[in-house]
Amino acid sequence: MKSYNIAVLPGDGIGVEVTQAAMQVLHALSPRIGRDLSLTVYPAGAGHYRNCGVALPDPTMRACEAADAILFGAMGLPDVRGKDGTEIIPQLDLRFAFDLYAGVRPIRSWPGLPTPLRDARAQHIDLVLVRESTEGLFYARGRGVVQQEGDQTIAYDTMKITHKGTARVCDFAFRLAEQRKHAGRPGRVTNVDKANVFTSMAFWRDVFLERAKAFPSIQIDHAYVDAMALNLVMKPWQFDVLVTENMFGDILSDLIAALVGGMGMAPSGDIGDKHALFQPAHGTAPDIAGQGLANPSAMFLSAAMMLDWLAERHGDSAMADGARAIELAVQRTFEQGAALPRDFGGSSGTADVTRAVMERL
Ligand code: ATP
């Protein structure tokens, strides 16, 4: 039987709970698609840092490097800080270490789940935000300076935009729009920048336009990030694929999650040319951790994204079938009213949602 090695990093807080739920789903799916999904759990995270002084142990890093894909829960705890006072965020280190340059955040509306938008067209939200994840303003992480200039104390963080970094993430967005076009979507990429103010962003736009020429079947348009924040609330059903700089993508990805009811339904993939990591867009949710209340759907959908990525990479359509099976099981769970998670005002906890999804696999 064809086999895939998945490095599983549950992490902290509800990361552990939703990862356990996703492992149950993947174990149940494996014989049905005739694929051995070998799931091996490795330690990492803020809890591990507190106990052992290291957030991402070397053996965990090596296992991630050797694995076919990485499935990641969530990491970080409010009371655990590094020596410089910053949060323990190993997911950022993994992004840089494995050059996971495309942060892929798909969202869609789910029949049966309420959205905060009143317009009936909100039932047709189906878009993907592609966030550049290795440079932009996040390049400044660990490099910022606070210095004295005359009688002023001034802090600087630098935004870095390279031609290579921008071209590869734009290409990724164009290829994604091509694939979605084959599946009946409009085939459009909207570039989100701030080219009217910043030299770095005008450069970003030039690279986007240069790369667009290689994808003549894809429509393009542009939006400034501030206008995009407005449009994503006013008419999100109009968008297909969005591509943007790291910090803008960080902010907009939480905004788009809210459009479909919150973080519990927002999966994500951090994808590079050789490696990829899949995780729910939410954090460790310390306010509900340990109580079995977390909605595991974002994690299930992240696992489905992982199967899709492996399917494409290995030309293995059974893995794509597995991805569709998970998505459909999640869809039917809510469509049929079999569960309503607590983040949507219901009373279904992690185990209830997991049971309902597994019954529909
Ligand atoms: P981070 O900084 O890592 O993104 P955060 O604390 O800002 O973390 P989350 O951990 O995502 O953000 O939590 C934000 C809010 O959303 C919290 O109130 C949390 O309880 C809720 N939340 C997040 N994920 C889920 C989930 N899967 N199910 C239910 N509620 C969730």
Image (tube, rainbow, N blue to C red):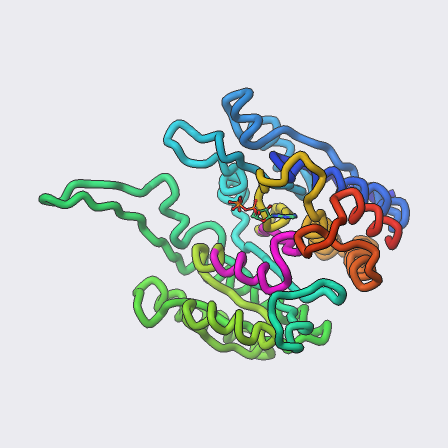
Instruction: Looking at the picture, tell me which residue is in the foreground, 24 or 354.
Output: 354
Position of the N terminus by quadrant = top right
Q: Is residue 64 visible?
A: yes
Q: Is residue 191 above or below residue 172?
A: below
**Residue drawn 48% across the image and 30% down it:** 80
Corner quadrant of residue 36: top right
Expressed as whole percent of the image width and height from the top left, the position of residue 64 reads: 63, 36
Expressed as whole percent of the image width and height from the top left, the position of residue 31 reads: 89, 45
**Residue drawn 31% across the image and 48% down it:** 157
Corner quadrant of residue 177: bottom right
**Residue drawn 38% across the image and 52% down it:** 137
**Residue drawn 21% across the image and 46% down it:** 154
State the residue lying farthest toward the top: 52
Q: Is residue 172 above or below residue 120?
A: above
Instruction: Looking at the picture, tell me which residue is in the foreground, 291 or 273.
Output: 291
In the shown orientation, is residue 318 left or right of residue 313?
right
Expressed as whole percent of the image width and height from the top left, the position of residue 205 reads: 41, 69
Q: Is residue 268 magenta?
A: yes
Expressed as whole percent of the image width and height from the top left, the position of residue 276 reads: 62, 47
Q: Is residue 93 above or below residue 60?
A: below
In the shown orientation, is residue 144 left or right of residue 310?
left
Instruction: Looking at the picture, tell me which residue is in the foreground, 275 or 111.
Output: 111
In the shown orientation, is residue 323 left or right of residue 223?
right
Total marks shown come to 0
Q: Is residue 306 visible?
A: no
Which stretch is magenta? 251-271
